Amino acid sequence: MRSPLTTRTIALGALVAVLVAAAFVVVASSAREARRSSDAAQRAQAVTISAVALGQLADRLDAAVRGYIHDDDTRKDVLGACRLADDASAPKDAVNLNNLDDWYEFHRAVLA
């Protein structure tokens, strides 16, 4: 028969072992969650950097498109088809001339 002190010591040791194991599980879980959070933060940062780069590219493309000017013959053809005067008030940029041409074709095809 064991002495009561030994039984208490064994029970206390078992309790300490369970608490240490529980603490290990909590620490491991926290570390895993921190790693997931870190991975997610890195992915979010990469997406943000990609979005910024894409935005800058879109800005450069928009500026290039807005700055494109049709040649004189194309401008005269579009304005003539739309029955608009080729004067100082007439659009010269490709975006507006293309819009005029598109609307002209739409009206001719659908509304005429």
Image: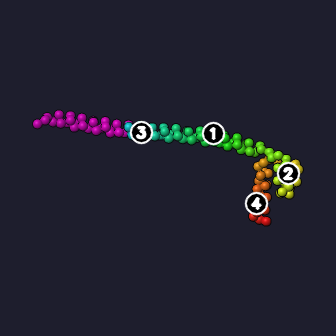
Mark seen at residue 32:
3
Q: Name the N-terminal-most of marks 1 and 2.
A: 1
- Callout 1, which amino acid? Ala
What span is in magenta? 1-27
Question: Could you tell whether 34 is left or right of 71 in the image?
Answer: left
Q: CA distance from mark 3 to mark 2?
A: 68 Å
Image colouring: rainbow
Return the x and y of residue 11 as percentages of the image width and height: 22, 37
| Cα distance between the residues tagged 1 and 2 | 38 Å
Q: Tell me, for residue 53, which label it has, or none.
A: 1
Q: Regarding mark 3 in the picture, which secondary structure is present there?
A: helix
Mark 3 and mark 2 lie on one chain; the one further toward the N terminus is: 3
N-terminal of the pair, mark 3 or mark 1, is 3
Q: Residue 1, image x and y in percent?
A: 11, 36
Identify the residue at image location x=47%, y=40%.
37
| Residue 15 covered by magenta stretch | yes
Q: Nearer the viewer, residue 82 or 18?
A: 82
Tags 2 and 4 in contact by the CB under 8 Å rule?
A: no
- Mark 1 surroundings within 10 Å by alpha-carbon count, few (fewer than 14), some (14 through 19), many (20 or more): few
The mark lying in front, picked from 3 and 1, is 1
Residue linked to disc 4: 106
Which residue lies at the image location 38% right of the left edge and 37% below the top edge? Answer: 27
Q: Secondary structure at mark 2?
A: helix
Circle on res. 76: 2
